[in-house]
Image (tube, rainbow, N blue to C red):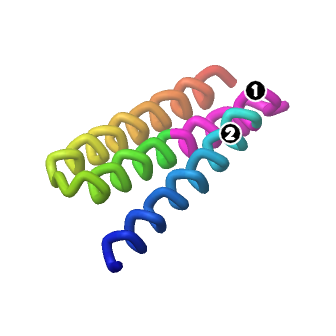
Amino acid sequence: MDTILSDTILIISFGILLLALVIAFARLYMGPTVHDRITAMDLIASVVMGFVLIYSVLVNKTIYFDIAIIISLVSFIGTVAISTYLKLKK
């Protein structure tokens, strides 16, 4: 009974993250400014990390935690690089 409930909660979490991903892609596409698009890209990276972490819990493998850490590092470095570029461009 406990595993059925936890699997159901994880699948619902996948659905909520999918909805957040669709909304973030909509903001990325419609964003009137470049700052909105940067924020949407950060949100997309966070949602992808959420997908990886929930999948990791679902299949009971801790190796996927490393992938989430790498995604967060690449996202942070990319955000800093784009922000620095935009600051120098002005």
Q: Which residues are magenta?
A: 27-44
Which disc number belongs to residue 64? none
Count of labels shown? Answer: 2
Q: Position of residue 88 (x, y in %)?
A: 58, 25
* Left/right of residue 59 with respect to residue 84 in the rendered view: left
Classify 10 Å Cα crowding around label 2: few (below 14), some (14-19), many (20 and above).
few
Residue 30 is drawn in which quadrant?
A: top right
Instruction: Say left or right for 56 vs 61.
Output: right
Q: Is residue 42 magenta?
A: yes
Point out residue 38 in the picture as x, y percentages from the top left corner.
62, 35
Q: Provide residue 54's location: percent of width, then percent of height.
A: 37, 55
**Quadrant assignment for the C terminus:** top right
Callout 2 amino acid: Val
Q: Residue at x 46, y 65 (%)?
A: 8
Q: Main secondary structure of the magenta part?
A: helix
> Which kind of residue does numbered mark 1 sit on?
Tyr
Residue of label 1: 29
Residue appearing at x 27%, y 47% in the figure: 69
Element type where label 2 sits in the image? helix
The residue where tag 2 is placed is 22
Q: Which badge, 2 or 1, comes first in the chain's sequence?
A: 2
Q: Nearer the viewer, residue 47 or 9?
A: 9
Q: Is residue 70 above or below residue 81?
A: below
Relative to 31, residue 89 above or below: above
Q: Which of 74 and 85 lies nearest the eye of the viewer?
A: 74
Picture layout, residue 9 above or below residue 35 = below
Q: Residue reaching furthest top?
A: 89
Position of residue 49 measured from the top left corner of the image (x, y, whole percent): 40, 47
Identity of the residue drawn at 68% across and 39% down: 22
Q: Quadrant of the N terminus?
A: bottom left
Crowdedness near tag 1: few (<14), some (14–19) or many (≥20) residues, C-alpha within 10 Å: few
